[in-house]
Amino acid sequence: MKNTKKPSLLFILLVVMIFVAFLTMSIEGRKNHHKKSRAHKHKKRGGGNGNNAPGPEHSPSTAPAPAPSHGYYPISSSVFNVLSFGAKGDGVVDDSKALQAAWKAACMVGSATLKIPSNFKFLISPITLQGPCMPKLVLQIDGTLLASPKVASWQRSSLFQWLNFKWIQNFTIQGTGTIDGQGSAWWNLSQVLYIQKRSKQIPGMKPTALRFYESYNVTVRDIKIINSPLCHLKFDDSGSINIDNITISSPADSPNTDGIHFQNTKDVEIQHSNIGCGDDCVSIQTGCSNIHVHHISCGPGHGISLGSLGKDRTVACVKDIVVENIIMQDTLYGARIKTWQGGIGSVKNVSFSNIQVSNVKVPIMIDQFYCDKRKCKNQTDAVAIYGVKYNQIIGTYSAQPIHLACSNSVPCKKVDLIDIQLSPLSKSGGFHQALCLNTYGKSFAPLVPSSIDYCLKKGGTSYNSLTKSHKYTC
Ligand SMILES: *[C@@H]1O[C@H](CO)[C@@H](O)[C@H](O)[C@H]1NC(C)=O
Ligand SMILES: *[C@@H]1O[C@H](CO)[C@@H](O)[C@H](O)[C@H]1NC(C)=O
Ligand SMILES: *[C@@H]1O[C@H](CO)[C@@H](O)[C@H](O)[C@H]1NC(C)=O
Ligand SMILES: *[C@@H]1O[C@H](CO)[C@@H](O)[C@H](O)[C@H]1NC(C)=O
Ligand SMILES: *[C@@H]1O[C@H](CO)[C@@H](O)[C@H](O)[C@H]1NC(C)=O
Ligand SMILES: *[C@@H]1O[C@H](CO)[C@@H](O)[C@H](O)[C@H]1NC(C)=O
């Protein structure tokens, strides 16, 4: 019996030891697991509440839920007022940091509104407001955004533009407010050259007021943009742009202050807006297509222009442009296409119609010899111009009714003149005759002055007669 009892006792002891060891391990394991899961939970909460920025102005009745860590936020309507982010709005203190913080907060929320309230003026340094943001962000400008009026305060790196919107989609700027570039100091060339030399800035470089870069489905409506140092509103490498009911204003003698400028931008509608400035009201540059400009009043300014294109022997491609229902008053040009000698590429399928002009120096102009210096070298290459219709251009001119100057080597083709009625502003004389150089197309009555009727060369309508390089570059 003893023999049998001893091993069994040992066995029981062994079993108990193993059991105790197992139990200890198991408890340790559970503790660890518990710790881990708590840490995990904590991290999750922290992620959403990480920023200390003020919340939406009109919070829903329950406190806003923290944003989940994966970044998706359920679509809700939230207003972010720049004043809640520390902006003073006195026009003296620099409010750029507050605007940037408000932008970042609004950008993370779907359908958010970033509010620039009325009756306040916000001094803003050059700033980039960058996406991608959640869809349907609205910048509601009811107050005033002011640029610094001092040329010397602009840094070398910020000379391209003042307000830079980059990589945003499904975005709207609207409101009754004003974007004021306070550019008058920039318009005095001698003063700017002096200051730029002293502060080692790039000579001749001036900032655009409002610029969009690589942005899609953008609406700009109702606001005013005034007194830019250079161009007022510019789109680069963008698409699906809608501009409605805006006002752009700067003095007639403010140099190079284009109204709206497009480059490499497609699918644009500009409508029901008032543009008066010191350069082109609308300027359409290379890489643009499907642009519809209508119900615009332009003046003072240099008219609505395609170009200048092909500078420094570059390739230029512009097509499918419609400009209609325009009032031009006291402008230098009306409907204009300007290209430099030596460029290549083409301008195709352009229509200017129902343009009322009054006191416009040259209402209809194509210039393949564009040159902003005194003299440019004659070159054989030219940006080809094919398919331009002028229809119902009616009113008064002060220098020349029509000026179509096309090159010998690459003549303009299919330029049609339909219902052109242009009379000199006064009977005092000194006006130039209609000019058509190397321009092929058809004309249809009524045509006033009647010299327009035999201005164009007949024939030459074949697109195939364009040189190969022009047909296949674009
Ligand atoms: C923009 O809006 C359209 C239609 O509402 C949607 O299909 C698209 O995904 C949106 N794009 C972005 C980047 O939010
Ligand atoms: C563009 O944005 C607007 C408003 O943000 C939206 O309603 C519309 O569906 C968008 N369209 C496209 C094609 O993205
Ligand atoms: C331009 O600035 C210079 C130097 O400050 C000044 O003397 C001149 O009167 C200014 N010209 C105009 C047109 O304002
Ligand atoms: C045009 O914008 C102004 C604000 O600048 C606004 O008062 C007016 O109602 C807008 N008109 C339309 C037709 O939206
Ligand atoms: C000319 O441009 C208009 C406007 O973009 C477009 O509707 C039309 O289809 C174009 N015509 C040709 C022949 O490409
Ligand atoms: C350049 O071409 C224009 C138009 O053909 C001509 O009037 C002018 O004399 C030429 N200039 C030179 C420097 O060859």
Image: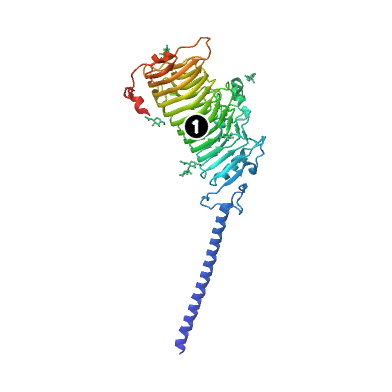
The quarter of the rendered structure image containing the C terminus is top left
- Vertical comparison of 273 with 136: above or below: above
Q: Nearer the viewer, residue 109 or 86?
A: 109
Q: Which residue position holds label 1? A: 270
Quadrant of the picture in which ligand 3 is shown: top right
Q: What residue occupies the far front of the structure in this picture? A: 446
Residue 114, image quadrant: top right
Q: Is residue 293 visible?
A: yes
Residue 196 x, y percent position in the rendering: 59, 25
Q: Is residue 171 left or right of residue 122?
A: left
Disc 1 residue type?
Ile
Q: Is mark 1 within 8 Å of ligand 5?
A: no
Q: Nearer the viewer, residue 244 or 57?
A: 244
Residue at 61%, 53% (x, y): give it: 61
- Badge 1 marks a residue whose secondary structure is strand
How many numbered marks, from 0 up? 1
Residue 98 x, y percent position in the rendering: 62, 41
Number of residues whose C-alpha sits closer than 10 Å to that of mark 1, classed few (under 14), some (14–19) or many (20 or more): many
Q: Nearer the viewer, residue 415 or 227?
A: 415
Residue 3 x, y percent position in the rendering: 45, 87
Q: Is residue 105 left or right of residue 466?
A: right
Residue 365, image quadrant: top left
Residue 110 x, y percent position in the rendering: 53, 46
Q: Is residue 285 visible?
A: no
The quarter of the rendered structure image containing the N terminus is bottom left
Q: What residue occupies the far top of the structure in this picture? A: 429
Residue at 60%, 20% (x, y): give it: 190
Q: What residue occupies the far bottom of the structure in this picture? A: 1
Residue at 55%, 59% (x, y): give it: 41
